Image (cartoon, rainbow, N blue to C red):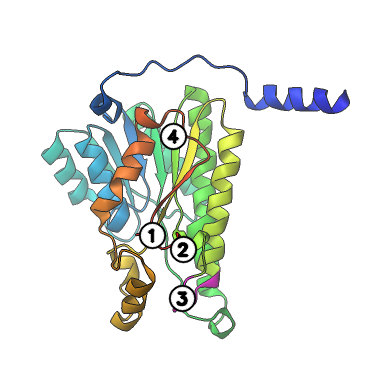
Amino acid sequence: MQALFIMTSYIHDIGLLPRPQPKLPTNVMDLFSLKGKVCSVTGSSTGIGYAVAEAYAQAGADVAIWYNSHNADDKAKKLADTYGVKVKAYKCNIVDPELVETTIKTIESDFGKIDVFVCNAGIPWTEGPSIDAKGWDLFNKVVDIDLKALYYCAKIVGQIFKKQGYGSLILTASMSGHIVNVPQLQAPYNAAKAAVLHLGRSLAVEWAGFARVNSISPGYILTEISDFVSEDIKSEWHKLTPMGREGQTQELVGAYLYLASNASTYTTGSDIKVDGGYCAP
């Protein structure tokens, strides 16, 4: 009886009570539209993040772009002019939780709300076997950017979602959170991305009463993040990937659009692998 009381109290506390059905459009294309939504994407001055920001603008959303070292003001203006939506760029060092909080609250003030938040910023591990790494700097940086900064963002935007009563949090994880990559060795990165996957599932349960949380696990994608790898290693990647190549960012953005849109209102606690079949064998 005590266990039943504890579970009932828990369900009530996190909002896991019957909720009304969402009002959804009947046309499938309207389900995927982001018109009227505000989307915020960290690490969006280049690579996957910028491709996602552009896809959201194409789908009709207003977009907040985040950058740190690569100024994105010109890119924000280009997206706004091209797609006729509101786009602003925000400079933020995401390893500083106070700056993260200030930035997210500024975005909320500038746009009036936040419907979708994509935690995308990340860096690779480039020092090979962990025991041979020089010092602790890169390990700390990988954990700070790939995991801790993501939590800072989630914590603050989660408060906004709870206040609004809705929201979609999308985490960029990695196939490296599911498997161990070879031939390059990158244990700290793999561990951080595995933590991202479980954090996403955990937050999905915590937030089930007011918001959705999902992740996307890209495989090898043609972006600047893998420029440090030799062509010989990339050739090995292709051999281990059933589709025999790296993916393009345009082959990835559809998953982000799905999780941002009303097409996914019954999807939470999930991870979508976009990896050319790497994790399938």
Q: Is the C-beta separation of discs 4 and 2 under 8 Å?
A: no
SS of the residue under disc 3: loop
Of the numbered discs 3 and 2, the one sitting upstream in the chain is 3
In space, the residues marked 4 and 2 are separated at their CA atoms by: 31 Å
Over which residues does the magenta segment extend? 181-187
Which is more toward the observer, 209 or 258? 258
Q: Residue at x 48, y 80 (%)?
A: 128
Which label sits on residue 168? 4
Give me the disc on residue 277.
1
Q: Are marks 2 and 1 in contact (CB under 8 Å)?
A: yes
Whether residue 223 appears in this view of the structure is yes
Q: Which residue is mark 2?
A: 281
Amino acid carrying mark 4 in the image: Ser
Taking the magenta stretch, the answer to whether it contains residue 121 is no
Query: Could you say where residue 67 lies in the image, as x and y percent from the top left?
Result: 33, 53
Please name the residue shown 62% across and 19% down the image.
17
Mark 3 vs mark 2: give the one in front: 2
Q: Main secondary structure of the magenta part?
A: loop
Give how far apart the Cα atoms at labels 4 and 3 are: 33 Å
- Name the residue nearer the viewer: 59 or 151: 59
For the N terminus, the image quarter is top right
Q: Say which amino acid is labelled 1.
A: Gly
Circle 1 crowding by C-alpha within 10 Å: few under 14, some 14–19, many from 20: some
Q: Residue at x 19, y 50 (%)?
A: 75
